[in-house]
Image (tube, rainbow, N blue to C red):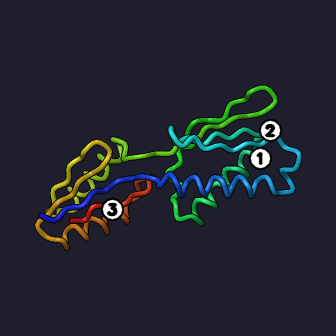
Amino acid sequence: MPSFDITSKADPQTLDNAVNVAKKEILNRFDFRDSKSEVELNKKDLIISIVTEHDMRLTAIIDAIHSRMIKQGLDPRCLDESKAHYPSGMVIKKEIKIRQGIEKEASKKILKDIKDSKIKVTAQVMDDIIRVSSKSINDLQAVIALCRKGDYEIPLQFINMK
């Protein structure tokens, strides 16, 4: 029985490359001369830590990271920027978490959209992925097209097509 998995993961090596290139770009910019700005990626916990002087530089750093991610082929929607920045002495800090896997709310929304489409497939949640199976490969391709059209606020990858 043909099946595939829907997941949302960012490749850690590509993400590391994007953050490193953004860091070099930021340090070479004229408006960042003599600033105490730092950008670090914690590969174990998948958290980007940003330290800078004020909001304008923080916004510029985040924009540089977004543009580098797009150029590296990563979707910037995998960054969870919901946590606000906080002051720490003379600098402000912000931690951006990288989303790995599909959260429960998004998986419920995806399952609901698949069931409402009346396509003859079975979809089930398995930890942080959704497995979709059907007797027809055409039905599976219709589900992929449906998921690509939907707005789930996370990047989706379709893997393990069997």
- Asked where in the image residue 50 lies, by quadrant, the reply is top right
Mark sitting on residue 115:
none
> Do callouts 1 and 2 mark residues in contact (Cβ within 8 Å)?
yes
Query: Along the horizontal axis of the image, is 141 left or right of 75?
Result: left
Q: Residue at x 50, y 51 (%)?
A: 12
Secondary structure, mark 3, is: strand
Answer few, some or many: residues within 10 Å of disc 3's Cα (few below 14, many 20 plus, some between 14 and 19): some
Label 1 or label 3, whichever lies nearer to me, is: 3
Residue type beneath disc 3: Phe
Query: Along the horizontal axis of the image, is 147 left or right of 27?
Result: left
- Asked where in the image residue 136 lies, by quadrant, the reply is bottom left
Secondary structure, mark 1, is: helix
Query: Along the horizontal axis of the image, is 54 left or right of 106?
Result: right
**Residue at the far top in the pictured view:** 89
The residue that label 1 is drawn on is: 57
In the rendered image, the quadrant that contains the C terminus is bottom left
Inter-mark Cα distance, 3 to 2: 40 Å
The residue that label 2 is drawn on is: 53
Viewer-nearest residue: 28 or 95: 28
Query: Along the horizontal axis of the image, is 25 left or right of 5?
Result: right
Residue type beneath disc 2: Glu
